[in-house]
Image (tube, rainbow, N blue to C red):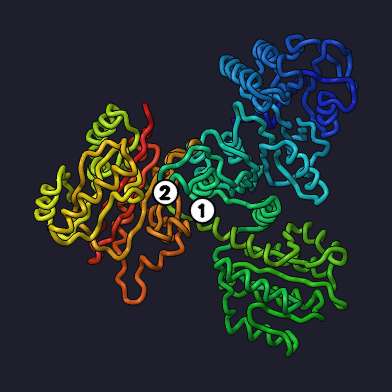
Amino acid sequence: MLEKFFSPRSVAIVGASREQGKVGHEIVKNLLLGGFEGQIFPINPKATTILGKKVYAKITDIPAEEVDLAIIVIPAQQVKDALIQCAQKGIKSAIVISAGFKESGKDGAQRERELLQTAQEYGIRILGPNCLGLINTSANLNASFSTEMPPKGNIAFFSQSGALGTAILDWAVGQKIGFSKFISLGNKADLAESSIMEALCQDHDSRVILGYLEGIEKGQEFLHKARQVSKVKPIIITKSGSTSAGTRAASSHTGSLTGSDVAFEAAFKQTGVIRARTIEELFNYALAFAYQPLPQGPNLAIITNAGGPGILAADAAEKNNLNLLFLSKETTDKLAALLPPAASVYNPVDILGDAKADRYQKTLEVVLEDPKVHGVLVILTPQAMTEIPQTAEVIGEMSMSTEKPILASFMGEYAVREGIERLAKYKIPNYSYPEHAIESFHTMWKYRRWQEQPPLTYVSLDADRERVRQIIEQVRKEGHLEIGDLKAREILAAYRFEVPFSRVAEDSSMAVALAEEIGYPVVMKIVSPDVLHKSDVGGVKVGLKTPEEVHAAFHEIMAKVRKFMPQALIQGVSIQKMYDGKREVILGMARDPQFGPLIMFGLGGIYVEVLKDVSFRIAPICREEAQAMITEIKSYPMLKGVRGQKPVDMNAIVDALLRLSQLAVDFPEILEADINPLIMKESGQGAVAVDARFTISPN
């Protein structure tokens, strides 16, 4: 799809410079030093040659019939005209290095809009503007102003930050870590992460895809592409900006709990993207995926020459839900026969501090033969008798004859340096600390499970959409953007939620009559489009069991609401059946500006308000995703039943989540929603949505 970006036969540099140190000069130099074998056409109206290459005054002067790629390095105000010249020459791919676009303010943003419009008009794809460029090591193409060309490898990396990109490239060169592609996204006026991931998925030179992102503009497109690509190749992304970016005062529980990072976390879970919390984690995971095969299961064996690090690794394995399996009797018998009596033949296998390379080799050979072992971590600490380079060699040789992943933790710095270099030669990832190796193995196993997960099925549920549309239109005509109480329950009923029977009383006598009809105990709530949080103004009474209590409650509710909100339009008091469920949950939705409707689930009461024990997914969700939302919260055991309690009806919660998801997808004008509480019936037979609230957009 982006072949002329990554493998051009000819490149024009618009803004090539004779002056060393200028970006236009460095790009020409990088193309030459990188060994690019295609044609190079520097463009500069004031020069004749640059670094031995003939210079042309303008793009249309280039004699070649076709030019595949233009790299533009001129002032922002001139880029649009240069793009038009590219169109005249038939160039369809352009890297805009130039800054001075939306990152520079209002005028720059307008320039960027015009640039994109021009590009779309002429069918030109753009990388950037305000970017570092790109590198393709397999084509010897350094179309960037990075000072270094990384070694060839199978790791592809895209970055929204050019400065971070240069630092990582320098680090890769220093660590001798090979890259296949490096892409600086810049402002992402045209080409963004979704297009790049799709191209890298088809790239035979790239085994793992890394990314650094600060934001995503087209969230739904990202979800679609990332889900497809991650089934083929691992995507590992570091996302910065983990604090809430929203400035709108949220009116619902869901709105108050969401932030920019919550949506990204949900997006990554739903698409199989592996999230790295730090740059260090990013490359810890990358090396494991790039160098080693995926494990067939979670069973990890640990071999160590020191007890302490082995215990640390065992603790980390348990925390990461890995299985530190019991080795088979046949394996332990073989180990006992070859190891000293003081050694431990169980997992972790402690081969003692005097272990030389041959003891590591024999132990590793026996452990790898155990069919229950899915991967091995080899720990080495430098001791007096340790043969560090030789041990690295035997580990490397063993890795060549097994399909099981082998990770290493040669602990230290100076003494183990040569051993680490030899491990790298055999593509054995080394981690300074065993905990990092364990986390990487766990991530590989999680990704393996994601790859093997069957395709998810998303279904459209039956609902009375026309009734919901009528309610929204009516509320808007009345001049309100909040929907609560009766109308909110009508919306839920239209989407097949079970809601309590409810009627509105305009005076206390009518309230008593309705309570007698419905049956005690009852709940009474103020009915007013102006009262959003009814409990805060004394607008709710629960557990009313007699006509006298209902009569008194009616007058008390009316008096308190009029006192605290004298301007509120009061339409009466609703009477509804009280459900005495022991366990309550909350469902919610808040519309994220990047990804769309974000569905929330959690236990009600203190669990959501104080502990914030909730889970999120982006709608639409399927049954499996709804089930995962339920099991993900820390308080999930309470739903399963503790201390003699029966489990709640999990299917009822799943159905409710699916129906809320459908509602959010069907009506983009619903900005926020809370179903609080959804009471689980004691019999375990379903759930009742006793209260709800919606916020809608003005148009």
Q: Is residue 341 left or right of residue 687?
A: right
Q: Nearer the viewer, residue 231 or 602?
A: 602
Amino acid type shown at disc 1 = Gln
Q: Give the residue drawn at x 54%, y 43%.
A: 260
Give the image quarter of residue 199.
top right
- Do the CB atoms of the residues marked 1 and 2 lie less than 8 Å apart? no
Q: Residue 488: image x %, image y %?
A: 27, 42
> Residue 443: percent from the left, percent from the top?
59, 58
Image coordinates for residue 58, horizontal then vertical, percent: 77, 11
As rendered, which of 258 and 55 lies closer to the eye? Answer: 258
Residue that appears at 63% across and 69% down:
316
**In x, y percent, where is residue 690?**
26, 52
Residue topped by disc 2? 253
Vertical comparison of 575 with 130: above or below = below
Establish if 72 lies above or below 449: above
Q: Which numbered dot is residue 330? A: none
